Image: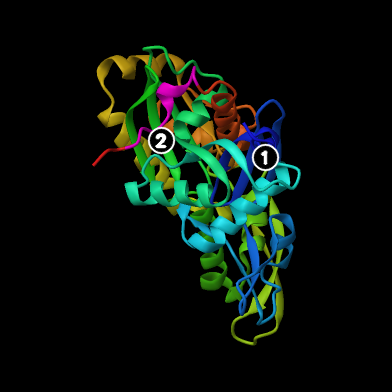
Amino acid sequence: MGLFDFLANDIAIDLGTANTLIHVKGKGIILNEPSIVAFDRNTRKIIALGNKAKEMMGREHRDIKVTRPMRDGVIADFEIAEGMIRAFIKKVNSGIVSARKVVIAVPSGVTEVEKRAVRDSAEHAGAKEVHLISEPMSAAIGIGIDVSRPEGNMVIDIGGGTTEIAVIALSGIVVEESIKVAGDEMNEAIVSFFRRNYNILIGERTAEAIKCQVGSAMALPEELTIEVKGRDLVGGVPKKVEVSSVEIRDALEGPVVAILEAVRRLLERTGAEHSADIHSSGIMLSGGGALLKGLDKRIRLETNLPVHIAEEPLTAVVRGAGRVIDNLNGYSSVLIRHRRY
């Protein structure tokens, strides 16, 4: 083993549409930053990433483009994604652009081509050995579920680009449902609502803030109001309006119903024994979407099943991937296997 290999760390990555989280073996979660990159339009050179790039979003000039290289949980811009992964690995590895072994969590619905793109990006970014794990499996491990047991456990992981729903038992996924409706879709629904009802254009960051502050899936004990600033689409000037949580809940109804329908489809495909297990243990919610006010109660109402929000739902996936990288041999059976052609 050379000095370069000795210095490099084994890492686990939750390469999310909204955020990238990195766990370093033996150290825990070292990085949690938005999956956002700012680059020069002329040279394609990365200027900023993560939190610094997020601050530029919607405020860039003509020579700078701020983008999210991940869309719907998969790589949309290969070159920029590779640069982002490389920069993040360098950041957690004390300036060394290398990692010996890497475990990356990916949506359960990704195609073989998309898996290859993720592997290639990590390898080009300096990883020596790349393993993939499905997000719901990783979330289940992160939550603390013993995935090796025969009893079925149901996990719903609502991220930025995808909602992953799976029943897990015997270190494998029994049934799964992956839909491209999650946090981003909710933000877009809020942007559309303001455009349609108030003739105001708001940015993605504003929509995200509205969702977090007053967004809900059920009536709140005390309804809230929020002041929103944007650009008047008629007059073209800055405009301010006040909206209630009731209006925002109506705006979010479409994405919320899409998630509920996916949950129902999965339950219909679940076998009798595992259905009985889920009736006892309930459904675990993870991911940023789990924090939408009243979503757990809404799922409970629709399914008549117990629903629990994971402790620290935003980090469940990377914590699970971290446990896997900390004990790669013990968890080898949960990794996505290479498909031979």
Disc number lying in front (1 or 2): 1
Residue where numbered disc 1 is placed? 4
Magenta region, main secondary structure? loop
Using the rendered image of the protein, determine whether residue 237 is visible from the camera's viewpoint: yes
Image-quadrant location for residue 56: bottom right
Which is nearer the N-term, disc 1 or disc 2?
1
Comparing 240 with 211, the one in front is: 211
Classify residue 243 as left or right of residue 269: right
Give percent across and percent down for residue 24.
67, 33
Residue where numbered disc 2 is placed? 165
Q: Amino acid at mark 1?
A: Phe
Q: Secondary structure at mark 1?
A: helix
Q: Residue at x 72, y 47 (%)?
A: 91
**Quadrant (top left/top right/bottom left/bottom right) for the C terminus:** top left
Spatial CA span between label 1 and label 2 = 40 Å
Q: Residue furthest bottom?
A: 235
Q: Are marks 1 and 2 in contact (CB under 8 Å)?
A: no
**Quadrant (top left/top right/bottom left/bottom right) for the N terminus:** top right
Which mark identifies residue 93?
Answer: none
Residue 170, relative to residue 325: is it above or below? Answer: above
Q: Residues within 10 Å of mark 2 (few under 14, many from 20)?
A: many
Q: Residue at x 50, y 30 (%)?
A: 138
Image-quadrant location for residue 337: top left
Q: Secondary structure at mark 2?
A: strand
Give percent across and percent down for residue 145.
51, 18
Residue 235, relative to residue 329: is it above or below? Answer: below
Residue 87, relative to residue 339: is it above or below? Answer: below
For the record, the magenta segment spans: 329-338
Using the rendered image of the protein, determine whether residue 245 is visible from the camera's viewpoint: no
Classify residue 327 as left or right of residue 167: right
Comparing 142 with 300, the one in front is: 142
